[in-house]
Amino acid sequence: MGFLCLFFTFSLLFLFSGFGFSQETPSAAPNHLGQINSNSVLVALLDSHYTELAELVEKALLLHTLEEAVGKHNLTIFAPNNEALERNLDPEFKRFLLEPGNLKSLQTLLLYHIVPARIEPNSTSDSLLHPTLSNHRLQLSTEDSSGAKFIGTARLINPNAVNRPDGVIHGIQHLLIPRSVQQDFNNRRSLRSISAVKPEGAPEVDPKTHRLKKPAPPVKPGASPVLPVYDAMAPGPSLAPAPAPGPGGPHHHFNGMRQVKDFIQTLVQYGGYNEMADILVNLTSLATEMGRLVSEGYVLTVLAPNDEAMAKLTTDQLSEPGAPEQIIYYHVIPEYQTEESMYNSVRRFGKVSYDTLRLPHKVLAQEADGSVKFGHGDGSAYLFDPDIYTDGRISVQGIDGVLFPPEEKNKEEKKTIKVATVKPRRGKLLEVACRMLVGIGQDSRFSTCHV
Ligand SMILES: *[C@@H]1O[C@H](CO)[C@@H](O)[C@H](O)[C@H]1NC(C)=O
Ligand SMILES: *[C@@H]1O[C@H](CO)[C@@H](O)[C@H](O)[C@H]1NC(C)=O
Ligand SMILES: *[C@@H]1O[C@H](CO)[C@@H](O)[C@H](O)[C@H]1NC(C)=O
């Protein structure tokens, strides 16, 4: 799958350069220097159900611009849902936006939906003009009769659809079209109608929606309705999807313990991950801890080093008190990520850092060889067995190395040199831990220590 995506990326870049976009492509290439937090609102947008908008942002080659913006400010993204972009948009206008020659218009249009500040519709006062990332401003307003909130001409239908530390996404009912883009479109249109002989009335703009009014086509009696059925339905609750279940909330109750047991059983049956399973269940109380977290509504992604990787751990790496727990905590990400979501992130942003349960250390991911590579330099590991277990709350991804936070790697490297003559073997982690437990008279509680 990874290779396919890579191939697709290259074909896309090739396609763009064929259209004379080549001066823009460097900003779209995934090899820029910065790195983006996996928890960013930008990553959330690309992974959200606002897929049409996300696709337009990518097509507009705006990722780099937005990545820079989100490094400096919180972002508020007003996101039209797929409905609004697929069915409710004038097809001619959409075609206009996607023509390579109109890249600038597309960029202006999209940047018009993004404000470089956090706007909470309820606490931000109305009638303020908010500068957007385009040169236009947007006004937040409230309709007196219904209390409905509007941004520009679009109704806010799903406020706080996505909330992240660096920004927020509010779902809106339709695309906002800045005047300059509307003008570009109108000019282009009249130019075409002039050159195309066939006379056409000047396009009329609906002042309420800022969209082109189109004369209703003649309808024969008994013909099927012109409007899609969605337009004819009474406005119901927001059509945008609910945000992914996040942490906490007294109303989230899951049998986390059962899910953890499930995933450990899957890991054992999968083969090649016995050490990891053993550590979680027999050596530490991490399985119980993870079960508790999941019961409370948290989601977790476990980067599970395979047995071969575990066997390379040295005695010194394991000898400090609490070392097994610390090592495993660095492999647990408090987010739900699949191979696809991680691969998409690194492909788009180059480098992505994920929080781990070992605070404050983050694990860095980047694209390498059509796969996801975690960690730095020698201490890196590839995503080796994707999606060993994924149930919507716990995701387990097999990796081919044990990861350490960067600042500890130097220390560890020195130690590795010291013990280089020790032959790596399976079960070392357990062996060392048992030795420690014998020391404090606790070994009898762990049957594994007596094998
Ligand atoms: C973004 O918003 C959060 C919460 O309001 C705030 O803590 C943080 O400092 C803001 N970040 C920037 C870069 O302004
Ligand atoms: C915002 O205000 C509206 C109406 O005043 C209310 O129904 C809604 O619950 C509020 N939302 C938040 C997040 O406070
Ligand atoms: C835990 O230890 C028991 C007894 O040695 C063993 O049978 C079991 O397979 C171990 N659990 C895992 C998950 O490895």
Image (cartoon, helix red, strand yellow):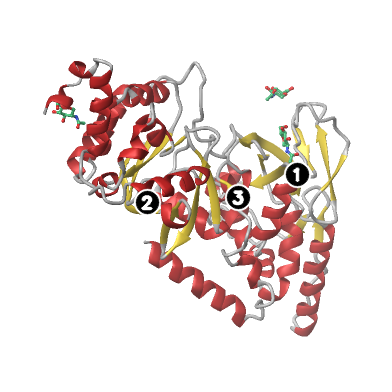
**Vertical relation: 180 (above or below) 356:** below
The residue tagged 1 is: 73
The disc at residue 417 is: 2
Query: How many residues crowd mark 2 within 10 Å: few (<14), some (14–19), many (20+)?
Result: few
* Amino acid type, residue under disc 3 in the picture: Ile
Question: Would you identify the image quadrant in which residue 286 lies?
Answer: top left
Cα distance between the residues tagged 2 and 1: 45 Å
Q: Please, what secondary structure does the residue beneath circle 3 have? A: strand
Q: CA distance from mark 3 to mark 2?
A: 34 Å
Report the quarter where the C terminus lies.
top left
> Can you say whether 157 is above or below 443 in the image?
below
Tell whether circle 1 marks a residue whose Cβ is less than 8 angstroms from ligand 1.
yes
Nearer mark to the viewer, of 2 and 1: 2
Circle 3 residue = 36
Quadrant for ligand 1 reads: top right
Residue 332 point in image, percent of width and height: 42, 36
For numbered disc 2, what is the local secondary structure? helix
Callout 1 touching callout 3 (CB < 8 Å): no
Please give the name of the residue rendered at 40% of the width and 50% of the height, measured from the top-left corner.
339
Q: Earlier in the sequence, mark 3 or mark 2?
A: 3
- Amino acid at circle 1: His
Q: CA distance from mark 1 to mark 3?
A: 13 Å
The numbered mark, 1 or 3, whose residue comes first in the sequence reads: 3
Task: Between residue 194 and residue 311, name the one nearer to us.
Answer: 311
User: Cβ of disc 2 within 8 Å of ligand 3?
Assistant: no
Asked if the residue under mark 2 is in contact with the one under mark 3, i.e. CB atoms within 8 Å, the reply is no
